[in-house]
Structure formats: C-alpha cells, structure tokens
C-alpha cells in the first residue's frame, strides 16, 4: 500500500486549491527551476479572485518580469510608496514592491522585515515573495546567507526543476554546485538522482534552510513534462513525503508553463 497519494489534479484545482491556501498567507518561494513563473502565476490567480496581493523579492528579479504585475512600486523612487501601495490594494490591483531599479535591468529586493510589517499590519491579504536567486538553473544549493526568508512566512515553497534528474552534476545544471556536493554527497560529474534531490530538500543546510518553525513546507517539482524518468519522480515524491522528519505538507508535480500539476500528500 502506498504511503502517499495523489489527491488533486489540474482538472479539479487551481494553484489556490492545490496549495490549500488559507484566507491570509505570506508565501515564500525558494530553490530554482521556476520560482518567478510561480510567483507571477500565483499573484495573478489571487488578484483575479479579488484578493489584495503584494508580490516582491528579498533578492533580485528582472524588471521585465516584475512589470508583468499590474502595479510596480519602487521605494527609492516614490516618497509616498506606502500610500500608493495601499491605494492600489484597495482598488484590488496586485502590486510588485521593490527597493530600486538597477543598471543591470533588475529590481533590488526589499528588506524582509518590511514585508513582515506589511503582512502583520494586514495591508495585504497575501504576500508572495521570491527569496532565492538561482541564475536560471534548475537546481540550487544555498550559501550560508541564503535564502532570505521573512519571519512572518506562513508557507515556504521549495521549487525544483526536474529536468535536472539524470543529468550530470555540473555548474551548468546546479547553481552553487560545490555546495550541492557537500550537502548531498554527490561528486561532480555523477548523475543527479531522486535521492540526491531529496538530500538537498531535507538537509538542514538545504532547500528549507531558515524556514520559520511555524511555516508550512511545500515542494513544487516543476517541468515534469521534460523529466526523462517517471519512476525517479515517483521515488522523489515518496522520499519527500515519507522519508525522515522533513514534514512537507504536500508535493505539487507538473509544469508551470503548461499550467498542469498534480498534488500529493501523505496517505491518512
């Protein structure tokens, strides 16, 4: 008998249902392989449902990506950014909040304590934050100062790009490959297996490092449509939900680009 079970698929659920979101949430995205795509999709879905949503980052994102959200407020550019943000939210417009635009074409993120304040003061129903940088890689291992997670996070959502499964461990595939080697025990050039990714997710210095004790943990295994081995994916789901004391609430498996996913939880 399986110790884990698929409870939902895209035919019957949107991201709000798939993540089992409550009426107010501070959602923090970490890892690699689709964080920004997930941030944009979730922000749009919540805004379409009439919720007051602030999106942002504690690291950096491209301005071209941030601008896909209806309103962009940059603190260094607007002396009255807070008043403008609250006005946007009252008008049910989703807002991306950043510190300033950079010459690189990116937006500098905001201090996590500021996001804590916005959420705790109930200016927004939902705060959705990208708290990790991965330079476009499908997998990322964090440095000691990463990820940058606000204290009021109610959910930390770790993203993994499944196209890495079966690939050789190289810096082209894994961001911070040297750290990944230390965390997982995998050597450079060896194949990245489901057990490698599980060790990254479950290690105290891995994907969920710095997660507040009160936060729920969720994993999104993205790009399942291009992963070469379904058995390896199923093994990874099993390990995440039943291996050790990781206490992941649910695992989403699918493709953000195609808008398709399944939801797995531990069997009752």
Image: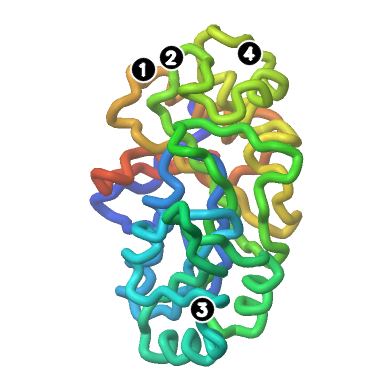
Q: CA separation, marks 3 and 1?
A: 48 Å
Q: Nearer the viewer, residue 11 or 100?
A: 100
Vertical arrangement, residue 148 with respect to residue 86, above or below: above
Which tag is nearer the camera, tag 1 or tag 4? 4
Q: CA separation, marks 4 and 2?
A: 13 Å
* Residue 195 in view here: yes
Residue at disc 2, secondary structure = loop
Residue on which disc 4 sits = 186
| Percent x, y of residue 197 | 56, 25
Residue at disc 3, secondary structure = loop
In this picture, residue 48 sits left or right of residue 60: left
Residue on which disc 3 sits = 77
Which tag is nearer the camera, tag 3 or tag 1? 3
| Percent x, y of residue 260 | 28, 45
In this picture, residue 221 sits left or right of residue 188: left
Residue at disc 4, secondary structure = loop
Query: Residues at badges 3 and 4 in contact (C-beta under 8 Å)?
Result: no
* Residue 268 in view here: no
| Percent x, y of residue 200 | 63, 29
Q: CA separation, marks 3 and 4?
A: 45 Å
Residue on which disc 1 sits = 229
Residue on which disc 2 sits = 166
Which quadrant would residue 184 be assigned to in this image?
top right
Q: Nearer the viewer, residue 126 or 173?
A: 173
Task: Specify which label sits upstream in the sequence, 4 or 2.
Answer: 2
Task: Specify which label sits upstream in the sequence, 3 or 4.
Answer: 3
Q: CA separation, marks 2 and 1?
A: 8 Å
Which tag is nearer the camera, tag 3 or tag 4? 3
Task: Specify which label sits upstream in the sequence, 2 or 1.
Answer: 2
Local packing at callout 1 (Cα closer than 10 Å; few below 14, some 14-19, many 20+) is few
Q: CA separation, marks 1 and 4?
A: 19 Å
In this picture, residue 139 sits left or right of residue 38: right
């Amino acid at each position: 008998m399986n110790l884990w079970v698929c409870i939902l698929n895209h035919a019957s659920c949107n991201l709000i249902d798939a993540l089992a979101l409550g009426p107010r949430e501070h959602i923090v995205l970490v890892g690699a392989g689709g964080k920004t795509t997930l941030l944009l999709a979730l922000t749009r879905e919540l805004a379409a449902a009439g919720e007051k949503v602030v999106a942002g980052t504690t690291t950096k994102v491209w301005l071209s990506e941030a601008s896909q959200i209806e309103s962009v407020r940059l603190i260094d550019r607007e002396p009255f950014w807070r008043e403008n943000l609250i006005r946007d939210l009252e008008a049910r417009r989703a807002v991306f909040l950043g510190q300033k635009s950079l010459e690189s074409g990116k937006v500098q993120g905001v201090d996590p304590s500021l996001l804590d304040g916005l959420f705790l003061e109930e200016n927004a129903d939902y705060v959705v934050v990208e708290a990790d940088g991965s330079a476009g890689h499908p997998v990322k291992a964090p440095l000691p100062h990463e990820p940058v997670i606000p204290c009021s996070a109610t959910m930390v959502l770790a993203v993994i790009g499944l196209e890495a499964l079966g690939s050789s461990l190289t810096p082209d595939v894994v961001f911070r490959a040297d750290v990944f080697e230390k965390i997982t025990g995998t050597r450079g050039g060896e194949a990245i297996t489901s057990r490698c990714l599980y060790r990254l997710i479950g290690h105290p210095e891995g994907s969920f490092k710095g997660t507040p004790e009160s936060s729920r943990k969720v994993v999104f295994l993205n790009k399942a449509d291009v992963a070469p081995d379904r058995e390896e994916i199923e093994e990874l789901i099993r390990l995440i939900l039943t291996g050790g004391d990781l206490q992941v609430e649910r695992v989403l498996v699918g493709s953000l680009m195609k808008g398709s996913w399944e939801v797995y939880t531990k069997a009752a």
